[in-house]
Image: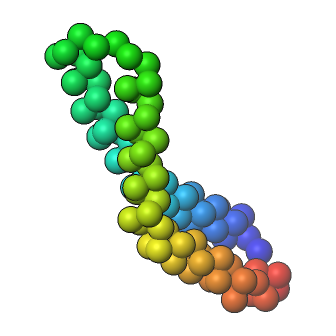
């Protein structure tokens, strides 16, 4: 197994991690920005108002994108295990 091959496997792993995390991070970012704008315009500085909507948004993202994220991770792991003999040789 060459160094380039190991780098390629690592690159695929990082891309998979980024794709799986993107919906949760993106929705959390959007909700956090909306809450920050709301807090700024209303001058409400309640700490729980900043965190609770983001937590709920991440849970909603997990529920909505969960099957897709699971399929993506299973495909990556299946690809690794199917090609394991060629990695060793």
Q: How many marks?
A: 0
Residue 15 seen from this side: no
Q: Position of residue 81 (x, y in %)?
A: 72, 83
Placement of 73 over or under 75, stated as above or below: above
Q: Position of residue 10 (x, y in %)?
A: 64, 61
Which residue lies most toward the right here? 88
Q: Position of residue 54 (x, y in %)?
A: 41, 39
Q: Quadrant of residue 5?
A: bottom right
Q: Quadrant of the C terminus?
A: bottom right
Q: Position of residue 71 (x, y in %)?
A: 51, 77
Residue at 46%, 52% in the rendered image: 59
Residue 71 seen from this side: yes
38 vs 45, left or right, is: left
State the residue in front, 3 or 86: 86
Q: Quadrant of residue 88?
A: bottom right
22 vs 73, left or right, is: left
Placement of 48 over or under 30, stated as above or below: above
State the residue in front, 17 or 48: 48
16 vs 78, left or right, is: left
Which residue lies most toward the left here? 41
Q: Quadrant of the N terminus?
A: bottom right
Residue at 44%, 63% in the rendered image: 63
78 vs 14, left or right, is: right
Colour pattern of the rendering: rainbow
Residue at 40%, 55% in the rendered image: 60
């Amino acid at each position: 197994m060459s160094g380039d091959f190991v780098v390629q496997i690592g690159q695929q792993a990082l891309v998979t991690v980024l794709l799986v995390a993107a919906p949760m991070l993106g929705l959390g970012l959007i909700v956090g920005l909306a809450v920050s704008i709301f807090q700024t315009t209303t001058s409400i500085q309640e700490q729980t108002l900043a965190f609770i909507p983001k937590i709920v948004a991440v849970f909603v993202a997990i529920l909505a994108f969960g099957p897709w994220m699971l399929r993506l991770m299973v495909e990556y792991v299946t690809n690794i295990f199917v090609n394991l003999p060629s990695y060793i040789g």
